[in-house]
Image (cartoon, rainbow, N blue to C red):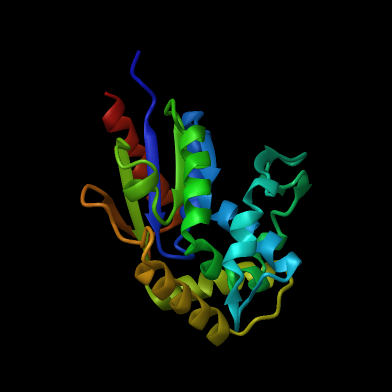
Amino acid sequence: MTKPLTIAIDGHSSTGKSTLAKALAKSMNYVYVDSGAMYRAVALYALRKGWVSKENGCDSEAIEGALDDVQISFELDTSGTNATFLNGHRVEEEIREMAVSHVVSHVAKLSEVRRHLVALQQAMGRNGGVVMDGRDIGTVVFPNAELKIFMTASDDVRAARRKAELDHNGQVVSFTEVLENLKSRDKADMERSDSPLFAAADARTLDNSDMSRDDQFELVLGWAKNLLV
């Protein structure tokens, strides 16, 4: 029997990594893990404690000292949606709000936070049969993943997608604010000293600026199936 794959999907914000990863995991009957949601959950915890702000950065000592008190899990809710839970409470929608988006990069750059979450992520995917998306999955979490994908799209396309998502959730945010937030997060992700965002040397680049969800799903599913032959 062919060993199940470990599939690592990295890339810029709002390129549809999670959407693709969820669809791929469902189709292949694999486990899906949203690593970005884990960083957002820690950021939400810190935000609630008053340990992080957009303007002043974060209290790294307080956040790193509380990591053992931050329990993150993924569960299917009653509608079949893969939802993020923080200390037993569903936070799937709250971690996607702009308040968290504005501070998550401050938290994600902390080395202790990254080491803590990477260890959890590696444990989740130890036996393969997992699709995980994020910023450093193919470079740090699973450097030996059989399939690595780096997703990207133009800034304007990404901002339009993100704004549509926020609009759908009833959050009134200007296109300009969304665009600037994406650019700021990209810069922070690529320039941080610990596990910066970049494409692994053996990753397949997927620019989906002009691709439908169905087209990119079929393309990536084909890549995965070819590795199982």
Q: Nearer the viewer, residue 56 or 156?
A: 56
Q: Quadrant of residue 176?
A: bottom right
Q: Nearer the viewer, residue 102 or 59?
A: 59
The residue depicted at 32 percent of the width and 45 percent of the height is 148
The residue depicted at 40 percent of the width and 44 percent of the height is 141
**Whole-percent x and y of residue 208?**
37, 61
Compared across the picture, whether 210 is left or right of 56 comes to: left
The tally of labels here is 0
Q: Nearer the viewer, residue 32 or 55?
A: 55
Q: Quadrant of the C terminus?
A: top left
Q: Residue furthest top?
A: 1
The residue depicted at 33 percent of the width and 35 percent of the height is 224
The residue depicted at 42 percent of the width and 46 percent of the height is 217
In the displayed structure, 42 sits above or below 156; it is: above
**Whole-percent x and y of residue 192?**
39, 68
**Whole-percent x and y of residue 46?**
68, 64
In the displayed structure, 219 sits above or below 109; it is: above
Q: Is residue 210 visible?
A: no
Q: Quadrant of the N terminus?
A: top left
**Whole-percent x and y of residue 205?**
28, 55
Q: Quadrant of residue 99?
A: bottom right
Q: Is residue 190 visible?
A: yes
In the displayed structure, 16 sits above or below 6; it is: below
